Image (cartoon, coloured by chain):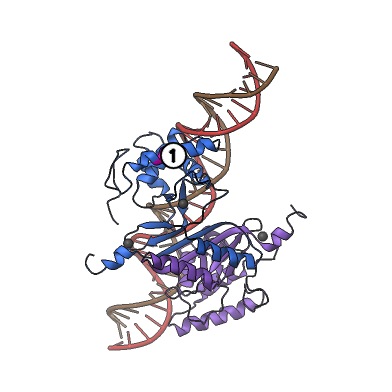
Chain colours: A purple, B blue, C red, D brown
Amino acid sequence: MSDHAGHAHHGAHHGHPRGGDIEASLDRAAATCLARGAQLTELRRQVLRLVLDSAQPIGAYALLDRLRGERRGAAPPTVYRALDFLIEHGLIHKIERLNAFVGCAEEPGHGHTHAHPHPHQFLICGRCGSTAEVCDESVAGAVAAAAGRLGFHVHRTTVEVEGICAHCHDTKSTSG
Amino acid sequence: MSDHAGHAHHGAHHGHPRGGDIEASLDRAAATCLARGAQLTELRRQVLRLVLDSAQPIGAYALLDRLRGERRGAAPPTVYRALDFLIEHGLIHKIERLNAFVGCAEEPGHGHTHAHPHPHQFLICGRCGSTAEVCDESVAGAVAAAAGRLGFHVHRTTVEVEGICAHCHDTKSTSG
DNA sequence: GGTCATGATGATACACTATATCAGGCCAGC
DNA sequence: GCTGGCCTGATATAGTGTATCATCATGACC
Ligand SMILES: [Zn+2]
Ligand SMILES: [Zn+2]
Ligand SMILES: [Zn+2]
Ligand SMILES: [Zn+2]
């Protein structure tokens, strides 16, 4: 499987943690949770690790299969409860179009939670399946303005863009 | 859960704002399909009528239940195939967050199809469950700009905003 | 007329996604 | 010890979406 998963923040220190970065991210996530009076338990840490370890958005049942490798007897509620917690605390996001989950590309500790989420959008490549999380304020602003014009009070915004990533577009004629 | 979704079959009126406009919309939809070399068959017309007749986004299995009132033996593929067709031709949209379907608020016949969809966003009220389709070019433009900066080629964009509609916000203290 | 390809629908079964519910374990505080 | 809150285990079920094959109508073609 290709490992070129989209990186929205070119050259930045954000992006999907890979390899050894994952454990550091887990530690930061644990600290974030503690500061909020919540606990990143071993189960939740395992699920978060599996999400972060996946190069692409991963479904709840795929997570469940992998989780069973280290936690025998895990069942759907096991993983769904962990996912709910992780979403609640802004550590992962759900991509609605795919019924799948990805780690948040923003560093934790910025006060992002389910109640105060950071603006984010997903670019989903229909060819290689990679996704990139972008945090474009102008998109969020345009949405807020359009909603405000209608007197609508925004709580949460889902933006999911389907298309072809730069890498696939560049290589479409050489490997298609 | 509100209970004013209606139980009637293909009656002409339920007190919905659209009312008798629905049959006219169906006729326009049929013409649009014909012009594209497709046919809005009786089944598809029935499903589209049920979607348009629903005051709120309606799920596939709720549609199936109602469809069985006029087409005995209807099964999940019956309604999903019709829905796929209607989406393909831009006559309805799917709201991913709700796993539900709504009629397109834009008039058909503007060349909107699955291949060339019009920009649209949904405002979903978390209190009354109503949704509004808005067609804000600036939102679409901001998304296109953000994606373009990353070399991402946009094919389709999903924007779904959860919040409180103006009506519910105005009446939040007067009625449960 | 007969044959064949196409598209739509009927019908059965299945896969995938998510939640409800109850029971048991753990720990802090009283 | 007891209680209450939180987390997890475990079973069952609800909700959403597809795969597959059969049947039927249509229209092109010979
Ligand atoms: Zn994020
Ligand atoms: Zn790609
Ligand atoms: Zn529309
Ligand atoms: Zn409302």
Residue B116 or A27: which is nearer the viewer? B116
Q: Is residue B10 visible?
A: yes
* Magenta stretch holds residue B149: no
Q: Which residues are magenta?
A: B25-30
Total labels: the figure holds 1
Q: Is residue B14 left or right of residue A162?
A: left
Which residue type does callout 1 highlight?
Arg
Q: Is residue B143 above or below residue B99?
A: below
Q: Is residue C29 above or below residue A7?
A: below
Which quarter of the figure has residue B7? top left
Which quarter of the figure has residue B174? bottom left
Q: Percent from the top left, x then y, of residue C27? A: 41, 83
Q: Percent from the top left, x then y, of residue B34? A: 51, 35
Q: Which residue: 53% across, 51% down?
A: B117
Q: Which residue: 24% across, 69% down?
A: B173
Which quarter of the figure has residue B23? top left
Q: Is residue C7 left or right of residue A20?
A: left
Q: Is residue D1 left or right of residue B87?
A: left
Q: Is residue A64 visible?
A: no
Q: Which residue: 48% across, 81% down?
A: A111
* Secondary structure beneath label 1: helix
* Magenta stretch holds residue B27: yes
Magenta span: predominant SS is: helix
Q: Percent from the top left, x then y, of residue D16? A: 45, 51
Q: Which residue is mark 1?
A: B28
